[in-house]
Image (cartoon, rainbow, N blue to C red):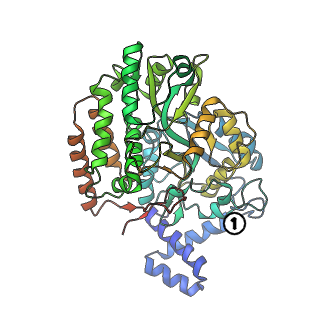
């Protein structure tokens, strides 16, 4: 077996050979410099030969058509019907002799951690949900397969189009590490604030565009109705943390949010960060949050919201599909950006967190790596993506796959919000890059939103942790720069 670190070196060697046109002697010399053993290099060549089986126009990734494939899907807000469709009617038809070992679960980490550590992971995984694996950690451990050959392969069912060119520009940038694609993101969506449009029409309300107006509206709701203004997914504080991320981005621009991502010495103590937390905590101090919210799961809080117990809830664009069975008749789910922090924000009200989510990965130590890549090529096809949108009501990163479909009110509102934002979109990465910062920031926001920590205390704790991470040489660092005008969110690169 080739260990993960040696596999990474071999992948690097093969890339250099392809780029520089090395001779056999030069390749062997370079392998020695990289510390690749002769046995590992031989095994790698055997693997390359096996992957070339039946390779051609209809099988560009060289998949062995008879090798079984292990597929694990997160059975969350989008369900798993779309994956079953790929199993049965796309991959299953292209490779009828390949048995698919399929599992849908919500407990990825607890269920598969031991297999990943033992070097016996599934081939492909939809790595999403609260118990998912940290993709940066997986990459640092050499667990993620390099998807370069997939990106360069023909898109399934689209003549003359590469797989990379079939995807919406910018959607895959955050899955790039060391210049190569290692994670693919499937669902195009946004995090925002959700409300019932029918209720707003009935009450003559308008969605507030500044935080000051949001707080004023919250007081009006308290005075005039028996509803709470806000609830959120209390047991999963990353939902409410997205409100903070957007307030910081809109008010301070790329400079402010990148300070947090890049572990700057004033990341959490900068004025805009403390101001955003201060304004958010007013939801608690002014009594605008549904009582007991801190103890609610995502589905519990969302159910209370749908039952009219609260007016606003923060969430991603999977909300409608996740709660489809309990949405009351006449409840018109729509989303809007988080209000501007101040009237002097650097970015307009329409600026918001837009990104592709639902991370798909192929494990480098899986038994059928090329089959896993092929599964992604088929899932991210026009056929696969169109089925996903029809089944879930959510958009994908596959260009034009939803064209002509009859979309729900919720999905239309997501489309409209993304279109209005234009290039003013972002996604924060500190929670993905640094597991400790992800966990502690969630803990601190949870405490802040129940009044057990002040914004100043939260900023101090998180800045101290940020400084500790920056000084810890054992922690791999990543950084990014603001995109050029009109460009999509920048990709991650190793920090110097």
Compare residues 82 and 254 and report the one nearer the observer.
254
Residue beneath the point at 45% across and 36% down: 209
Residue beneath the point at 32% across and 59% down: 475
Q: Residue 167 placed where, x, y %?
A: 64, 54
Q: Residue 12 placed where, x, y %?
A: 51, 71
Secondary element at tag 1: loop
Residue identifier under label 1: 52
Compare residues 18 and 344 and report the one nearer the observer.
344
> Which residue is situated farthest in the front direction here?
343
**Tally of numbered tags:** 1
Q: Residue 395 placed where, x, y %?
A: 63, 41
Category of crowding for the residue at label 1, using alpha-carbon neighbours closer than 10 angstroms: few (below 14), some (14–19), many (at least 20): some
Compare residues 214 and 479 and report the one nearer the observer.
214
Question: Does residue 234 appear anywhere in the picture?
Answer: no
- Residue 146 vertical placement versus 187 (above, below): below
Compare residues 180 and 345 and report the one nearer the observer.
345
């Amino acid at each position: 077996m080739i260990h993960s670190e040696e596999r990474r070196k071999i992948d690097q060697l093969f890339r250099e050979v392809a780029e520089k046109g090395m001779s056999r002697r030069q390749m062997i010399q370079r392998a020695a410099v990289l510390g690749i053993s002769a046995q590992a290099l031989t095994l790698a060549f055997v693997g390359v030969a096996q992957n070339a089986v039946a390779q051609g126009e209809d099988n560009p990734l060289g998949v062995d058509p008879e090798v079984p494939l292990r597929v694990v899907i997160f059975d969350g807000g989008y369900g798993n019907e779309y994956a079953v469709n790929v199993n049965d009617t796309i991959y299953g038809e292209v490779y009828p002799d390949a048995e698919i070992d399929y599992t849908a679960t919500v407990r990825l980490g607890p269920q598969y951690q031991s297999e990943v550590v033992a070097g016996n992971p599934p081939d492909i995984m939809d790595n999403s949900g609260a118990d998912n694996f940290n993709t940066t950690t997986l990459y640092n451990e050499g667990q993620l397969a390099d998807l370069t050959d997939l990106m360069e392969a023909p898109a399934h069912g689209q003549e003359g189009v590469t797989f990379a060119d079939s995807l919406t520009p910018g959607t895959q940038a955050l899955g790039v590490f060391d210049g190569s694609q290692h994670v693919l993101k499937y669902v195009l969506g946004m995090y925002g604030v959700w409300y019932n449009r029918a209720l707003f029409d009935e009450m003559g309300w308008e969605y507030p565009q500044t935080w000051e107006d949001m707080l004023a509206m919250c007081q009006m709701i308290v005075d005039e109705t028996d509803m709470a203004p806000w609830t959120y997914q209390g047991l999963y504080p990353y939902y409410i943390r997205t409100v903070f991320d957007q307030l910081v981005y809109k008010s301070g621009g790329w400079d402010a949010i990148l300070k947090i991502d890049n572990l700057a010495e004033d990341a959490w103590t900068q004025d805009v960060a403390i101001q955003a937390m201060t304004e958010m905590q007013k939801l608690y101090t002014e009594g605008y949050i549904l009582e007991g919210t801190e103890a609610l799961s995502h589905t519990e809080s969302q159910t209370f919201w749908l039952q009219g117990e609260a007016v606003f809830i923060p969430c991603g664009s999977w909300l409608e599909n996740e709660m489809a069975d309990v949405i009351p008749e006449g409840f018109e789910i729509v989303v809007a950006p988080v209000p501007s922090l101040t009237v002097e924000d650097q970015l307009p009200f329409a600026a918001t967190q837009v990104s592709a989510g639902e991370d798909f990965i192929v494990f480098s130590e899986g038994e059928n790596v090329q089959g896993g890549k092929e599964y992604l090529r088929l899932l991210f096809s026009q056929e696969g993506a169109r089925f996903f949108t029809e089944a879930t009501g959510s958009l994908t990163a596959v260009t034009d796959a939803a064209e002509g479909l009859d979309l729900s009110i919720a999905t239309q509102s997501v489309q409209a919000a993304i279109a209005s934002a234009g290039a003013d979109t972002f996604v924060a990465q500190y929670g993905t890059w640094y597991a400790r910062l992800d966990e502690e920031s969630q803990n601190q926001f949870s405490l802040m939103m129940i009044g057990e920590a002040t914004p100043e205390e939260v900023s101090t704790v998180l800045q101290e942790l940020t400084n500790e991470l920056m000084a810890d040489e054992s922690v791999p660092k990543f950084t990014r720069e603001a995109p050029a005008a009109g460009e999509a969110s920048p990709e991650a690169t190793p920090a110097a």
